């Protein structure tokens, strides 16, 4: 495929977007952008604090704004938050401004990868049940990606190599 201006990673929490984005940016010499980190910087608080203080709708507005700003630039590897696909206009802007790669994984593996992390407000309570519910709700939302990698049985380095081989 011809080189796009940005590589944009989408997918559920725990599919390895941030780690793989970091590796890709090193390999390609592209700037690394983590949308969640940019949101935290802009708002001056953590994602859980933002959810607790202002709610998910507010978070989604900031996420949309930050994504639009980031997509004005090129030569970046962009790791998005898992819920960025909930807004169709986000999906359209990502497709228009980069090569969109979806990372997937089996729910059991996601549960294992996110266990012990307390930085995901949407997983409060029974994390496994929440992951299965969210995956079901979003099962079609990641399908617009240009390329999809099932990371269930792969290391982050293997996922990175696969993506580079198809870029
Ligand atoms: C979310 C995923 C998180 C973060 C927020 C909401 C989601 O990012 O944006 O907690 O709705 O799936 P990661 O996918 O990087 O965990």
Image (spheres, helix red, strand yellow):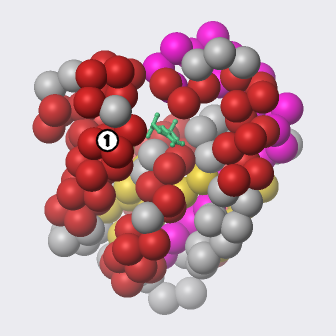
Q: Return the residue nearer the eye: 19 or 88.
A: 88
The magenta region covers 99-120
Give me the residue at 53% from left, 47% from top: 82
Q: Is residue 94 left or right of residue 149?
A: left
Provide the secondary structure element on which disc 1 rests: helix
Residue 55 image offset from top left, x and y in percent: 34, 33
Give me the residue at 60% from left, 76% from top: 144
Mark 1 crowd level (few <14, some 14–19, many ≥20, 10 Å Cα): some
* Label 1, ligand 1: CB separation under 8 Å: yes
Magenta stretch: residue 102 in it? yes
Q: Quadrant of the C terminus?
A: bottom right
Q: Is residue 37 above or below residue 75?
A: above
Q: Is residue 100 left or right of residue 79?
A: right
**Residue 128 visible in the picture:** yes
**Residue 161 visible in the picture:** no
Magenta stretch: residue 143 in it? no
Q: Quadrant of residue 145?
A: bottom right
Q: Which residue is mark 1?
A: 59
Q: Is residue 107 left or right of residue 57?
A: right
Q: Quadrant of residue 138?
A: bottom right
Residue 6 image offset from top left, x and y in percent: 36, 70
Residue 119 image offset from top left, x and y in percent: 47, 20
């Amino acid at each position: 495929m011809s080189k796009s201006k940005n590589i944009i990673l989408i997918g559920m929490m725990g599919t390895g977007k941030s780690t793989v984005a970091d590796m890709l940016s090193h390999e390609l010499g592209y700037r690394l952008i983590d949308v969640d980190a940019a949101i935290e910087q802009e708002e001056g608080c953590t994602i859980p604090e933002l959810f607790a203080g202002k709610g998910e709708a507010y978070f989604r507005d900031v996420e949309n704004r930050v994504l639009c700003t980031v997509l004005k630039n090129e030569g970046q590897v962009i790791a998005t938050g898992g819920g960025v696909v909930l807004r169709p206009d986000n999906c359209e802007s990502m497709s228009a401004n980069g090569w969109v790669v979806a990372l997937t994984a089996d729910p059991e593996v996601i549960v294992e990868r996110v266990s012990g992390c307390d930085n995901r407000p949407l997983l409060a309570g029974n994390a496994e049940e929440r992951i299965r519910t969210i995956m079901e709700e979003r099962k079609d939302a990641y399908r617009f990606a240009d390329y999809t990698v099932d990371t269930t049985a792969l290391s982050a380095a293997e996922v990175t190599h696969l993506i580079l081989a198809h870029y």
